Amino acid sequence: AQSVTQLDSQVPVFEEAPVELRCNYSSSVSVYLFWYVQYPNQGLQLLLKYLSGSTLVKGINGFEAEFNKSQTSFHLRKPSVHISDTAEYFCAVSVRTDKLIFGTGTRLQVFP
Amino acid sequence: DSGVTQTPKHLITATGQRVTLRCSPRSGDLSVYWYQQSLDQGLQFLIQYYNGEERAKGNILERFSAQQFPDLHSELNLSSLELGDSALYFCASSVDPPSEQFFGPGTRLTVL
């Protein structure tokens, strides 16, 4: 079975500072990896995905993530955050790109 | 806007009642997924339909059922509702084979 661990439930950061949201996964087979963002009272929006190929993945809104197979990690990064990045971020895995297994989420709070 | 629509947006009902949540996938998507988001369980996969047939089942209670109709819209039926069923219910759709899932805005169910 697969599982996802998001180590930080909350990450406070000041505007224009860099941020990293951590995600580790567990699986005995190859997985596909995703980061979704959920703004208050909204649905989930895909930020980026890793299916294969380059381990550095660029997504929307200036976010990127790096797939590290040896460390079973898929950390999300942004070099300079904005107030509008305040949201809940979910890491997810799937096998053969079917059902998604989500982590518990990380609340990113950006302060002015 | 993901192209996935869900109705109703909000639903308030009493324990013991039955409700139906509706989802229309993006045009051309044959797969529909249902997820439940609650404070104690997080985001959990419930069930997947592909072109009218059940394809995968997750942590879906026996009191819950779903179906996908010939026009590809899907309904999630929740019966004998309990307080603990209060949650946000998301529908997602994808092409096949899927490279990502597109989420609807969700239906917030409150059981009083």
Image (cartoon, rainbow, N blue to C red):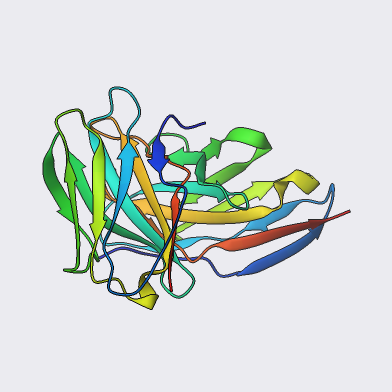
Q: In which image quadrant can residue A92 be found?
A: bottom left
Count all numbered tags in the image, as a single digit. 0
The percent position of residue B11, horizontal first and vertical second, equals 43, 57
Asked whether residue A81 appears in the rendered view, the answer is no
State which quadrant residue B41 falls in. Answer: bottom left
Q: Farthest residue in the right direction?
A: A112
Taking the spot 56% from the left edge, 47% from the top edge, the residue there is A42
Q: Nearer the viewer, residue A44 or A89?
A: A44
Q: Where A32 falls versus A57 (above or below)? A: below
Going by the picture, which residue comes out furthest to the top?
Answer: B28
> Which one is nearer the viewer's eye here, B76 or A95?
B76
Locate the N terminus of chain A by quadrant. Answer: bottom left
Q: Is residue A7 visible?
A: yes
**What residue do we see at 31% from left, 34% from top?**
B94
**Which residue is drawn at the image coordinates 77% and 51% (left, top)?**
A18
Looking at the image, residue A83 sits to the left or right of residue B39; the answer is right
Front residue of this view, candidates B79 and B72: B79
Return the x and y of residue A80 as percentages of the image width and height. Answer: 78, 44
Residue A38 appears at what percent x and percent y?
Answer: 56, 50
Q: Is residue B94 left or right of residue A6?
A: left
Instruction: Name the residue nearer the viewer: A51 or B63.
Output: B63
